[in-house]
Every structure is written in C-alpha cells, then in structure tokens.
Amino acid sequence: MGDMSKNYRLNFLKEVEANVEEGEWVKMCMQCGVCSGSCPLGKFWNHPPQEIFMMIRAGKREEVLTSNAMWMCTSCYNCIVRCPRELPITHIMHGLAHYAKRLGLIPQQQPTAKFAQLFWNNLSNKGRVNELKLGVKLYFMNGIGEGFKTSLKMKDIGMGMMKTKRMNPLEIVGGHGLEDIKGFQAMLKKAQELEDQRIATPRP
Amino acid sequence: MAAEKKLVGYLCTGCGISERLNVNQLQTIAVREGKIPEVKQHARLCAPDGVQMIADDIAAGATHLMLAGCSRRSKVEAFSFPNVAISRANLREGVIWARPNTPDNQETTQEMANDYVRMACAELRYLNIPSPSGEQKLNKNILVVGGGVTGMTAALETAAAGYPVHLVCDEAELGGVWKNLYKRVPFRAAASAVPNGYDVDLPQPEEPGITEMSAQVLANPLITVHFNAQLSKTSGAPGRFAADITNTAGATVTENFGAIIQASDFKEYDANQLPEFAYGKTPDVMTNFELERLAKAANGAPLKRPSDGKIVESVAFIQCAGQRSEQNGHLPYCSGFCCTESIKQALYFKAQNPDCDTTILFDDLRTPGAAGEDFYRCGQQEMVTFSKGKASAVVKNSAGLTVKFQDLILNEATELNCDLVVLATGQIPNNGPDPYAQLAVDEAETEEEKEAARIKLEVAPPSILNLDYRQGTDLPQLKHGFLDSHFICFPYETRRTGIYAAGPVRRPMDMKQAMDDAVGAAMKAIQAAESAANSAAVHPRVGDLSYPVFRKEGCTQCKRCTVECPFGAINEDENRYPVFNESRCRRCGTCMGACPVRVISFENYSIDSVNQQIKAVDIPDEFSEKPRILVLACENDAYPALDMAAQAGIETTPFARVVPVRCLGSVSLSWITDSLSSGYDGIVLMGCRRDEDYQCHFVRGSAIAAERLSKVGDTLTQLNLEPERIVVHEVAITDLERAPRLLNEMAQNIEKIGMSPFKF
Ligand code: SF4
Ligand code: SF4
Ligand code: SF4
Ligand code: SF4
C-alpha cells in the first residue's frame, strides 16, 4: 500500500486548484459517473474523468499526473453537456495534461503527447503548419521501419492531397511561412514569459 | 330518529341505463319484491331538478331512500341528505359498465341489475338513521407529551389555532434531544438564481433557534408547561381524556383533554455496540450526538480531541454507523438525518480552519429536505471530501487514528489517518412498551418465537402514556418500534383514536421534518377533539355518526370484541362485559364481525343489513348454468377498484353480486355460512394488504378477517363443499385489471367444480 500519510488529504486537490486550469471545479464533482458513462473513449484509458476527480481528492498525485487519461481526451464535449454539476470537464482534462507536461510527467511513448509536441515545433517554426513535414515527422516518429509502412499505407491520401493542391511536395525544402517571422517569434517569447510569470505567482 | 319509516325509491334512467336495461322491470321489482310503495324514475337524478325532487320528498316525510343509478361512490355530494337513510343500487359501474353491450349478454345483465335493486331495497329496510350520542362535550384542551422541538412546535401550532395546550416535559427545561444542537441544518434551499459553481452562495448551518422557541412556548398564554413531569395515568377517550400529570416531587394534577399528541422524539443509539470502530476504546472516537455537545460547549472555539487536547486537524465521519445493517445490535433502517448532520458538523471544523481535512465516508449520501442538495454542495465548496466508502475498522496509531475502508469508487482497500473519528449513529424511537408484547408471548407458535417475544417484553421501556386501556398502556408499534399506522397514507394516525404520534417517534427524521410533522399532528388532534364533541368518527370514516350498539343481554362475555378491536376502543366493566368507548371507535365493524352471538351492530350497518342483501339475490336452480358468486368487498380499496375497472371498460362476470363492507374485519362468519346454505356457488372476500406494509384503513381488519376465515374450512367439510368455493384476496385500489379477473377466475372454477347442491 505504500505511504498512506497523504491519503484523503487536501494537499493534491489544492495543488490542482492552484495549477490546473478550471481546477477549482474538481471538488464540486458529485461522483455521479455521468461523464464516464458519456465519454466515447474513456473505457480505453486507465481512468475515466469521474475516477480522475476522485483520485485527486484521495491524494493520488503520482497516479493522476502520470495517467494517460487526460492525453486521450478528444475534446468531444459529451461530458460537459451532460454533467449535472456543470463541471468544465474537458477543460480540466486538458489543464491536467498541461500541468503534467510542465512537471515532465508525461507517460513514456504517449502518442498524443508526442504529436502535440511535433505540431507545436512545426507551427512555432514559421507561424504556419507545414503539412508535409508534419506528416513525415509523425509517420517516422517511431522509427524508420514503421515510418515507411505508414507512408505506404497513407500514400493514396497524400497523392489526393497533392492533386487537389492541399499539399505541395516542394514544402519539404523550406516551406511557406509568415512574412514577419521575427515578430512572430518575439510574440511567442513574450507569451512564454507571461505564462512563466503567471505560474510563478501563486493564486489567491 | 323518525318513528315511522317512509320508504321512497328512485330509478335513474340517465347515463345509458335506460338504453341498456329494462327500467320498467326494475321498477316493478322494487315495488313488488322490494316493497317500496313509491318508486320514481328520473332522466338524470343527480341534476338539480332530480336532487330537488328528492329534497321535496324528504321535506314531505321520506326517511328511507333507495337510489338506483350510479355507484355509491359517485355523486356523493349531490346525494348527501342529512338525517335520512340511503341505500344505493349500483346499476352503472356495477352493471352496465362492467358488461358488454351485446344481445346475447342482455339477459344476464338485466338479471344483475334486478338483483342489485332487490339488494338495495332489502338493505334499506334494515338501515336506521344514526344520531349523535352526545357522549362527549367539546373539550378544546390538547395534551402534548414531549418537550422537544416536535412537542414545542405542536404546542405552538395548536395554540395558534386557538386551542389551549398542556405540555408535559420530563425534564427541567424545554428542548429535549435537540437542546444540545450547536447549529442546525439549514431549512431553505439556495436562491433559485444561484448557479452551479465553486464559489456561490449556498445555505450554511443556521442558529438552532431552540432557545427562542422555548421562550415562545413559555410566553404563550394558551400553553401550560409541566416541567419534570410524566403521565402517571391516562384514561377516557377523545373528547374526555383525563390525564394525571405527576412531577418528580410526587405532586399530581389531573387535567381533561380533547385529544393527545405524543411527541416523545428519539433516543440516541448506543455506540458501545460498535467495537469495530474503537468506540469506547478511545475518546477520540465519538458519535455525532457527542460531537454536537462538544461543539456546543466549545461555542466556536477550536475543537480539540478529547484524549490529549490537540486541536483537530483531520477528522473522518463514518456514515450509517450501526445502521442499515441486519447485523445483531445494528439498526436495520436509515435514520434519515445523519448525512446532513455530518455535513453540518464537518463545516464546524472548516469554519475554524479551512485547511482541516474532513472526510465523509458514505454509502449513499441522502440529503432530504429543501436545502439538502444545496447543503451538500456547500460542504463540497468548503472542501469537505466526500468518499463513497465502506469503513471496516478504526485502529489507534502512534499519532492518532487510522480508518480502514474500501473506496467504492476507486474500488480498493485503503485507509486514512486522522485525529478524530465521528460515527454517524441513528435514532431509536422513544416509545413506551409495546401493548401487544404480552399477546405476542401468548400467541407465539414456536418456543423460539416465544423466547424472543419474552425478551422483548422484559427489556420494554417504561410507559409514556400509562393508558388504562384494556389493550395496554401505550401506543401500538409498527416496524422497529416506531409508532405509526401508515407512513404514506395515514401519517400521525395511530391505533389509539385521538392520540397522534408526531416526529421521530413515528419514523426517523430531522428537525425540520419533525416540525412539519408536529403541525400535521396538531391539526389532527384539533379535528379529533371537535369530532368527538359531535359524536362523529375520525379517519377514515370522517363524520360518521353511527357507533357500535350492543345488546348486553345476549353477550356471553367471550371478549372477542375487546381483543380484536384494532383501536383498543373497548374496555371491560367489573362484570367483564364490554364497555364501548364511542369516541375511540373508528366504526370499522371488526367487533361486529367478531361477535359469535351477533349482538353488536350499527344503525346503518349490521349483520342483518348485509344478510338481507345476501338473501335478496335471486338464486337460479342448479341446472340453469347461472352460478351466483357473493363478493364481500372492502369499501376503501376493493370496491373502488371494481368501480374503476368498469369505468375503464374491463369486463366482470355477470354472476358476481358485490356487497361493499366497511372492512373485511366486519365480515361475520354467519354471512358466509348463510350464503353457502342458501345456494351461492362461490364466495370471494376482497380486503387490503395486511403484512407489515399493510394498506388496511383499519390497520388490522384485513388480517383479523383472514385469521377468522382460515377456520371456515370445517364448515365447508361439514357441508361437503369444495374448499375452492371460498377465497380471500388482498386487493389494492390500483388493481383495476386484477380485481375483475379474480371474480372471473372464481366463475371459471365453479364451471370446473360444478354448481352448489344447496339451491332451493
Ligand atoms: S458528470 Fe460531473 S458530477 Fe458527475 S462524475 Fe462527472 S464530473 Fe462528477
Ligand atoms: S471531452 Fe474528453 S473526457 Fe469529455 S467525453 Fe469527450 S473525450 Fe471524454
Ligand atoms: S367498530 Fe371497530 S373501532 Fe369501533 S369498537 Fe368495533 S372494532 Fe373497535
Ligand atoms: S364479542 Fe359479543 S359476546 Fe363476546 S364479549 Fe363482545 S359483545 Fe359479548
């Protein structure tokens, strides 16, 4: 059973309230289970939303923050529209994912987390998404062999996109971007500064 | 009562009656066989001109009216004429609506109608007009027993209606079990505009208001409070109760009352029966009641744990402790107040220290009342942790306590550490001894049952009312020692007329519910006092002026009536003759059905009035293939069910003849034997459900009838008749499909076993 001293203590709930977007709502969950029953994907994850909220209140910090649950949420909003207590469940799930990433607690080989990082790297480079590069990076994310296999599987879609001018093969070199890339980078830097500041200042 | 009986018959031809039936034939039957000299037809008897016609006849001297038309349950208001006797032939619901309108059914349908007219005429001759006995005068004084919130509220409400109250309180101050409240659970829900949220305006624990309420009671000129006092003797009946109020110094005053409210509230559960939660092993495990006293004493100062005075920084509440469990020594029921109570108490800790860890381990969180759900939200908002979990043990550790439990959401065995454990224990009704406990010992069938009954008798609490009734000193009990007749249908009613139970003594409840309950019981008590003054019955035959009349010369002193009366209405005199207390009587007729020598009757309901109906039915001969089934149907449930079935177009066999009875308890075995020997082929008795969750308006009537009828088997064997010819059914008012089906089944059975050989 391990260390029980933090069991059902408020420490972790308070940590969530202070650091997770919409975390103040977690205490209001009445454990009805409607969200878990409504979530189209919850049954494939290790903990559906209701359980995550109870675990937070039971003080299960490690298990919550290393869970794959919040990474698997597809933002379908089924739970939000159904929750009788009107908890912004989807937002809390994303808030938890964000907090887990800040703490470096993403599960190993978590595909959505990996993709999110690839997407961000791709986008923040030139201010525009480079579909071709993103696709290639994604396919080869788990090694060369798997990369070729996936590429072959997806080749018809790729050809179609090229034909309809949704993807330009020349993007592989350079690629399009914003006019003022420098200004864009400066903006991102400022935003990061503000975010760091926000995190550093404890909430009332 | 009018010396001369003047009989008039009325035949309504409306509502399709004249289209379906030969009304002239009915008229001839009423005159020739029914011996009603004058029978009038009217196209719509319930219309103003029809009612006026009847009123005019009454003004001209008519005393006995036979109304043939709709059911006795229809048009009650139109046909309510004072000071006359009325019988009704149910041609609409009972005949034309219950039968299909086809030519091949015409003959049997007409025969049904003919019989119902014969029956109504026969009954009418044996009805007398009840008049008030004048046995009681109006006594507006109401006695309230119990000085808690229930008793105080009952006293204040009674006084507010203008009725003087004597409140008997067994302590030196008012408040009872509630006076230790530090705060109370809020009474009102959040404002309707308050949305869901984590920082919204939700109901908080409130000032208990007990001191203010006591002050109001003491200041009320209509309320007299007897402190340190108990009832040493209560005698009489509604309208003329006499109570000896004795105080601890031994002084007694006798007061007279119209009615009584018993509001003796509850006793705390003894948590020593919960060793698994370390109760008694450490003072840091306490009950919800004990914590309340601690909080009251602290009066807002930080709560400390008793063992070492450390300020409590973490506390666990174990819900349903010793409750909702079949384990020996546990309460099998939910006390209904402890969930909100624990939320309130958790908030005591939060009010002093928002960082205090407070965990409520519940199985089902039940938060009744207007504020319930909002109060739960309030607890959540203040960061009380609610965990669906089943506690198995509390053990001491080096720093405090460990609660071991199963988390039912996370589905794992786990534990938590805390400074203090609060056990949410339950309410036990503060009742007197069960008046039927001795009877239970006498009647026990096995040695085991006898022993259990004897133990119950030995550990019985002291009497509260000290009634000098033949049937015991206190109010009868239902489940788990709570005093009540019926939770849902007839709250406050008990089996002792004019004595009403209110508050947690009749079912577990919180303070707000106890106050609401007290208001209801106060209204009932006032009604009972007023009714007694008019010699009128209370629930369920409200306003009935008839009462049991008993022919002493014929009585064999067998005591059946005294024992079987569900309401303890009958005492015995020094010569062991029954003494009827009219105002205690509910007019159920159980005594009439019980009496083997048939000396008990009512002016408007008697052995004869039913027997004559039974005899009036025309019995076709054995070879006619037209059996006759006598149906004795409870007027409260079975009879309405049959009426409503007909209204819904459900068919009933044309061979049934239905006689409404006040209660199956009033069924005399003589009706059964007489009808068998006069050629009826089958008998169906329809009463109410009679187990613990009974629906009998007279509580035990249906059960008593079933017991009596279990002995009918012998009669059948003597007559060489098949036992299937008599059946007793429990029928609810909602059994629209089933009630007619039961009669149809009897008709089918008779087809199988053959007609009765006893036809003349
Ligand atoms: S639907 Fe809402 S209240 Fe119900 S378990 Fe999910 S988050 Fe909690
Ligand atoms: S929004 Fe996310 S957590 Fe909510 S139901 Fe959809 S996938 Fe499940
Ligand atoms: S009619 Fe009923 S209540 Fe009245 S004395 Fe008879 S048995 Fe008792
Ligand atoms: S049941 Fe009849 S005979 Fe027996 S005591 Fe009562 S009145 Fe008398």
Image (spheres, coloured by chain):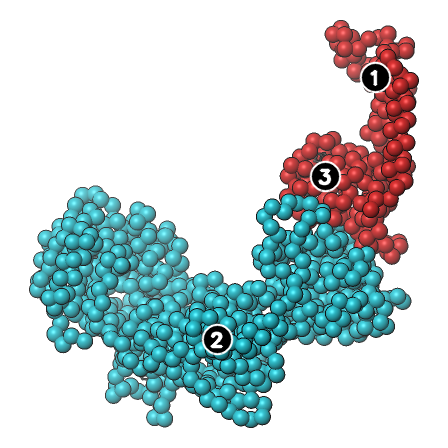
Q: Residue B22 vs residue B512: left or right?
A: left
Image region (quadrant) for ligand 1: top right
Pick the front one: B196 or B315: B196
Residue at (85, 68) in percent of width and height: B310
**Three-letter code for the amino acid on which mark 1 is drawn:** Arg
Q: Quadrant of the N terminus of chain B?
A: bottom left
The C terminus of chain B lies in quadrant: bottom left
At a point 86% along the width and 37% down the height, the residue shown is A198
Which chain does the residue under circle 1 lie in?
A: A
Residue at mark 2 shares a chain with residue at mark 3: no
SS under mark 3: helix
The label nearer to you, 2 versus 3, is 2
Q: Amino acid at mark 2?
A: Ile
- Is the CB–ligand 2 distance for label 3 below 8 Å? yes
Q: Is residue B256 above or below residue B191?
A: below
Q: Which chain is red in the picture?
A: A
Residue B331 vertical position relative to residue B568 in the rendered view, above or below: above
In this rendering, does residue B705 appear at all? no
Q: CA distance from mark 1 to mark 3?
A: 30 Å
Element type at mark 1: loop
Tag 3 residue = A89
Mark 2, Cα crowd under 10 Å, few <14 / some 14-19 / many 20+, is many
Residue pointed to by mark 1: A128
Q: Chain of mark 2?
A: B
Q: How many badges with numbers are in the image?
A: 3
Does the image show residue B375? yes
Chain letter of the cyan region: B
* Residue in the foreground of this view, choosing between B257 and A180: A180
Marks 2/1: CA distance?
Answer: 82 Å
